[in-house]
Image: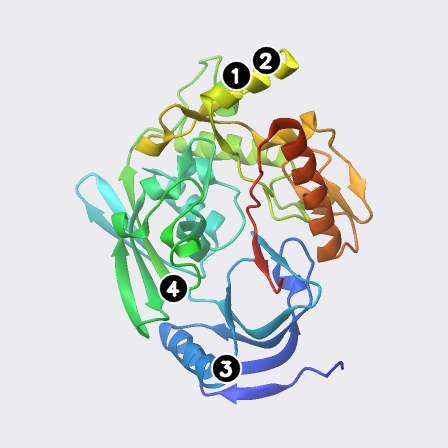
Amino acid sequence: MNREPLWCSLDAMLLKENKPLAPFTTFGIGGPARWFAEAASEEDIAEAETWAREHGAPLFVLGGGSNLLVSDAGFSGLALRVALRGIAAANDAEQKIYSVAAGEDWDGFVERAVRDNCAGVECLAGIPGTVGGTPVQNVGAYGQEVASSIERVRAYDLQGHAFVELNAAECGFAYRRSRFNSTDRGRFIVTRVDYRLTHGGAPTLRYADLQRAFADGSKTASLADVAGAVRRIRQSKGMLLVEGDPNCRSAGSFFKNPVVTNELLQQIAAGIGVQPPRFPAGPDPENVGRSKIPAAWLIEQSGFAKGYALGAAGVSSRHTLALINRGGATAAEIMALAAQITGAVEAKFGIQLEMEPVLVGFE
């Protein structure tokens, strides 16, 4: 039964009933939340958690909505949008520590750091979403990830009903992972992230696309140059939010680049007659003898070209790693396309692709 949205009081916050969630996501897909509230302070977060617990309502924390797919049925509990704001900076020798509230726009913070000539996040320019989501996914791109710059994460512990501060080691960072989205998924609500950046540091130029952008050696690349190049590359791949671009109605990279054994890579090469592209899996001991293989390459080799469509869902016309809402797509259509792709990749290469977006409201 459809109900008209209603407002009721949650002391400092307004609690809205049957609030559509699609407008809060970059996909533009999803049904309503049974209850919805915005938290502008840590006190609001604690109060909302108490309300949800006392009313037996599941709690989902909504940030920038850029790595999220909401089901067509919506969410049956309380969707809490974290809207804490503020950035504070403190000098520490040749480094600067930024304490950034979870509701701050991530790309806005990157711009601030680059403007301050502080290195460490310049390759993460143009990534949509809010600061609070960066430690959860260990956001990374173009040769950097936030794990290398995060000093501390402040969060509300839903088990202990108290605010805690975790250093980088306690966050359990790995490739696109942290304790927040793995062993302790759903336990913490991030309220602030502290980043340690290097004042006057050199930009990171590990990624091939970036190296090519500055290959002529005509000038020394500044942090601003690199951040600008990253945004141009992202836009060329449909990974930069641009008004009116249908390729932007997505959750960014829908699949993670799988880490595979070098033996499997050789088997793939023998089967198709060419060496598949690969790059280092990372320094973790568990990655010895393993490499990352681009999920986009696997998808293309499995028969899904740019622009492939399945109903109103589709593959981006600029990058096969992004699934898009071509206009009026449902979550069911996106999931059907994802299943079609993962099934084809596994059948051809024996590799199971892992979805990157957070799924909300799915059984």
User: In the figure, 219 relative to 180: above or below?
Assistant: above
Between the residue at mark 3 and the residue at mark 4, the CA separation in whole angstroms equals 18 Å
Alpha carbon distance from label 2 to label 3: 55 Å
In front: mark 2 or mark 3?
A: 2
In primary-sequence order, the first of circles 2 and 3 is 3
Dot 1 surroundings within 10 Å: few (below 14), some, or many (20 or more)? some
Which residue was labeled with disc 1?
266
Q: How is the image coloured?
A: rainbow
**Can residue 316 be seen?**
yes
> What residue is pinned by disc 3?
56
Nearer mark to the viewer, of 1 and 3: 1
| Amino acid, disc 3 | Gly
Q: Position of residue 136 (x, y in %)?
A: 42, 53
Residue situated in front as seen by the camera: 54 or 206: 54
Q: Which residue is mark 4?
A: 188
Considering the numbered disc 1 on the image, is that residue within a helix, a strand or a loop? helix
SS type, badge 3: loop
Residue sticking out furthest to the right: 311
